[in-house]
């Protein structure tokens, strides 16, 4: 009886997360060069962390010894390997400039370069879409070693766009990009891309979260990693957002969560993206939450519409 109830609950929740009809992706009305030129060094430095916090909390952060947060190491003064695929995201929403994090992910369409991030990094609902949106893979201390990639289309999920009480279940966004200086280039050919999967339940496994935190004790200049076990489902309901231990702050929003298959606290080649940094609770200083992305849900439909 209990097993049957759990199966019915999971089925019902998956159906609830399934994708209703979505609006078409928003196109960039500006040229790549115009979008890139907006981001002067001064504007990039002054951009504010884009963050989301919820009141309450109390789920804890786990034992100090079973999770860690560290600065991503450099090779020859720059990010190398998989770390080049992580980047900083800059955007304007409702007249203010913000920063988030993002990941270059696989695309199945030749010539398409796709960035995965949080929904709140691209929109806060109809009429509040990002403009001047760019991705800087391997960003470090104000430098753009792998170029500036400007958006051509952006979108989020209908659940995030609706801004309802359950919106954080759907807090993922994505955008296609082109290289402002070399339109024929692709992310895959320049820095490489990460695999992304849907419907992967990480309960009982370890995860690696990457981001550019820019609030509090962080300044947004470099990448950080949180390596943690999966903790729990928020509000203890299967398919609710997932909790890990992490003390990264605003600016890390949208950074990828990767399955740490070999438990070495590093996002190794082939380890897929399964979620993104989404929100924290006001009274939990060492936790981070990310949306679960069902196999047949809105996140998958978003990916299919842009890949």
Image (spheres, rainbow, N blue to C red):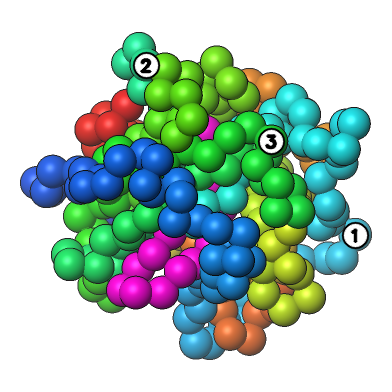
Quarter-wise, where is residue 96 in the image? bottom left
Q: Is residue 165 visible?
A: yes
- Determine the secondary structure under disc 3: loop
- Determine the secondary structure under disc 2: loop
Give the magenta range: 91-106
Question: Of callouts 3 and 2, which one flags the residue occurring earlier in the amino acid sequence?
Answer: 2
Q: CA distance from mark 1 to mark 2?
A: 44 Å
User: In this picture, is 133 found above or below 111?
Assistant: below
User: In this picture, is 290 found above or below 299?
Assistant: below
Which circle marks residue 111 in the picture?
A: 2
- Kindly report which numbered mark, 3 or 2, lies closer to the viewer in this rendering: 3
User: In this picture, is 30 found above or below 268?
Assistant: below
Nearer-the-camera pick, 287 or 7: 287
Q: Residue at x 53, y 87 (%)?
A: 56
Would residue 45 appear left or right of 240 to someone viewing this image? right
Residue 72 falls inside the magenta stretch: no
The 10 Å Cα crowd at callout 3, few under 14, some 14 to 19, many 20 or more, is some
Q: CA distance from mark 3 to mark 2?
A: 21 Å
Residue annotated with mark 1: 65
Total numbered labels:
3
């Amino acid at each position: 009886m209990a097993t049957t109830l759990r199966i019915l609950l999971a089925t019902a929740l998956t159906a609830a997360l399934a994708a209703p009809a979505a609006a078409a992706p928003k196109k960039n009305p500006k040229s790549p060069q115009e979008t890139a030129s907006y981001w002067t060094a001064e504007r990039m430095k002054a951009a504010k962390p884009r963050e989301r916090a919820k009141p309450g909390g109390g789920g804890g952060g786990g034992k100090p010894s079973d999770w860690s947060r560290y600065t991503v190491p450099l090779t020859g003064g720059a990010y190398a390997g998989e770390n080049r695929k992580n980047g900083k995201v800059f955007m304007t929403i409702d007249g203010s400039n913000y920063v988030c994090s993002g990941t270059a992910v696989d695309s199945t369409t030749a010539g398409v370069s796709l960035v995965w991030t949080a929904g709140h990094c691209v929109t806060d609902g109809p009429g509040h879409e990002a403009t001047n949106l760019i991705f800087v893979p391997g960003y470090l201390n104000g430098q753009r070693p792998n170029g500036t990639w400007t958006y051509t289309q952006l979108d989020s999920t209908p659940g995030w766009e609706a801004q309802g009480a359950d919106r954080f279940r759907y807090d993922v966004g994505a955008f296609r990009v082109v290289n402002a200086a070399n339109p024929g280039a692709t992310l895959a050919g320049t820095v490489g891309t990460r695999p992304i999967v849907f419907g992967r339940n990480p309960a009982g496994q370890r995860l690696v979260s990457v981001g550019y935190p820019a609030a509090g004790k962080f300044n947004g200049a470099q990448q950080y990693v949180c390596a943690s076990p999966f903790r729990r489902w928020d509000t203890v309901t299967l398919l609710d957002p997932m909790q890990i231990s992490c003390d990264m702050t605003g600016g890390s929003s949208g950074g990828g969560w990767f399955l740490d298959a070999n438990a070495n606290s590093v996002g190794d080649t082939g380890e897929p993206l399964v979620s993104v940094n989404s929100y924290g609770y006001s009274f939990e200083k060492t936790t981070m939450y990310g949306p679960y992305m069902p196999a047949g849900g809105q996140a998958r439909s978003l990916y299919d519409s842009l890949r």
